[in-house]
Amino acid sequence: MNNLLLKPFDAAPFSKIKPAHYLPAIKNAISLAKKEIDTIVNNSEEPTFSNTIEALEYSGELLDRVTSVFFNLNSAETNEEIQKIAQEVSPLIAEHLNDINLNQELFKRIKFVYAQRDNLNLNAEQYTLLEKKYKSFSRNGANLEDDKKEKLREIDKERSKLSLKFGENVLAETNAFEMLLTDESDLAGLPDGAKEAAKAMADSKGKEGWLITLDYPSYIPFMTYADNRQLRKKLALAFGSRGFNNNDLDNQEIILKITNLRYQRAQLLGYKSHAHYILEERMAKTPDKVFSFLNDILDKAKPAAEREFKQLEAFAKNLDNIDQLQKWDSAYYTEKLKQELFDLDDEKLKPYFKLENVIDGVFKIASTLFGLQFEEINEVDKYHDEVKTYNVTDLEGNFISLFYADFHPRPGKRNGAWMTSYKSQMKKSDKNIRPHVSIVCNFTKPTPSKPSLLTFNEVTTLFHEFGHALHGMLANTTYPGLSGTSVYWDFVELPSQVLENWCYEKEALELFAKHYETGEVIPMELIKKIKESSTFMEGMATLRQLSFGLLDMSWHDQDPGYIKDVKEHEERIFAKTSLYPNVKENCMSTAFSHIFQGGYSAGYYSYKWAEVLDADAFEYFKENGIFNKEIATKFKENVLSQGGTENPMTLYKRFRGQEPKPEALLKRAGLIK
């Protein structure tokens, strides 16, 4: 018991944990969790909701706590020793989860309870939990005959190999291309920072000149700012042909195999298609609903996109006598037009967004809307000196949550921004156990002469992650597996995306956007420019997102056996969303890692889906005042506190009084009046 992770703890004892504690603690916690499962399985009493479903839900609590500390630190404050332990720990946890999911005796008990579900007088949350437990087994083949289980395992093994190979091919083709420039005039238009990065890349490879690659930090600035049109074309063709070069890194055959295996798997499990299988656990529910959703937005966005494209064509013709805009012209002329229309850049805005002021602003907004109070405290253990810790209470002083905030980059911390949890909210033994929530970002550090000043994009990022944090903090459910952000994939972004809207409102900006030297509130002129530029070329951007969603669904909503030619299939799907001429050398699908390597198959639509939810929700606030207490309380009570206890659309309609309307998104995007 010298291992702190195995002793009861509330706030994680970060400074006292040594890397050597993790592996023994996790092994011990797995062993304890196994015993808890055995107790459920060996119970001689008839299976009930309490002795089977609830017992399973509350099992493994120590394992959850220990692994949350370990894996969160592996993201935010890692080192070689922790990474090595992660390699050893991950297979142990995966094996433990498989042992649970494939435990036939356990499934028999769950099935017994599930069969009686309509006669058990369960409340909505209990019913949801029972369904979730049953589905987690049945959707992974627990109901299949042994020969079909074996077939399922073969399919899954082959699918995982193919997805891995798909990603390896994209990465190899990305890494294989280099464009070495030796004449500085070829870099005309590039910002100094991009030039320096290209020079450093060349130096690192022992080459003279400037090296441009297909990695985003190199590719995007070149496509956006480089004046040399031929070089932009060369780069765009290389980027767009990854996995489509008829070589040993070609992904066309792999795509056909992956989609067919997904279809076979869905059929084996009793579903019409892979999309039907995936969407059963999403708000959209059916492929028809997704197609209807995407096509409805397409009908409304396309006229605006076509107007924007004509405007861009005229601008390029007038500026550089370009007769036919090509895909490699898109980012370049869009940026030039934006600079002409809006005299706005981050350097003008940053002085008004000192980090401490923005934090104070988001706290004030949360306080006004949801009745929360934030007090910075120093007695809670931290994993790094830079981490800030806050005690979150309601207006009566009742404890709501412990909140960690980690804002700056450093070695051992991965890129990006995210929200996470160290302790789930749940109700157990007549206690409401409150959560420990964290946000992690990578914002500009303060310098000796200046505080941390955020770009406007960083401001919206902070609000976004804080929206997720509120979803975690205000959780008020019985079961940890349904608490906070444990919701459907196409619903989880609602709290985060909706909070971003306050960043664009005068009433909210005036609370925190004050010049760090003079204290002057951000001028109305700048607020107006922020608002105006937020919808620039939104029609074209919307069409692009819709094209990806439609392509994804076309691969997964039916038997893909009829598709023999990847490029031909893609051209047919893109016909109604294309603005630029087709580029025969390029193919989107062969590098569409989101759906063929990542977890977005039959789910790419969810980016737009969540935008519709947040725009519709915020319109409700706008109609009644962005700080309307009654609307905020409805959002808190029906969305933020409820987690995944009921179907998300049920929760949303309880808040909004109706299903979300895409018109709110189109109006916010400036696509309709």
Image (cartoon, helix red, strand yellow):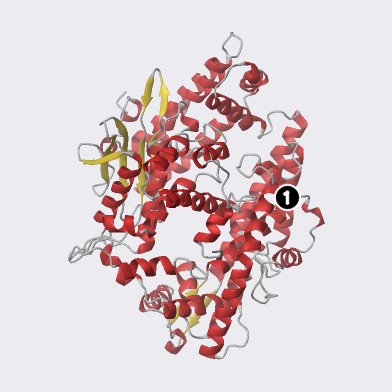
**Residue 570: image location, x then y, percent:** 71, 64
Apparent side of residue 141 relative to residue 476 in the rendered image (left or right): right
Viewer-nearest residue: 443 or 168: 443
**In this view, 570 is above or below 388:** below
Q: In the displayed orientation, state which residue is furthest to the top.
A: 45
Q: Amino acid at mark 1?
A: Asp
Q: Is residue 254 visible?
A: yes
Graded by Cα atoms within 10 Å as few (under 14), some (14 to 19) or many (20 or more), the crowding at tag 1 reads many
**Residue 385: image location, x then y, percent:** 23, 47
Q: In the displayed orientation, state which residue is furthest to the right.
A: 562
Residue that appears at 32% across and 50% down: 362
**Residue at which label 1 appears:** 557
Callout 1 secondary element: loop
Quadrant in which the N terminus appears = top left
**Residue 387: image location, x then y, percent:** 27, 47
**Residue 288: image location, x then y, percent:** 71, 48
Viewer-nearest residue: 56 or 15: 56
**In this view, 44 is above or below 25:** above
Q: Residue 121: name its quadrant.
A: top right
Viewer-nearest residue: 596 or 426: 426
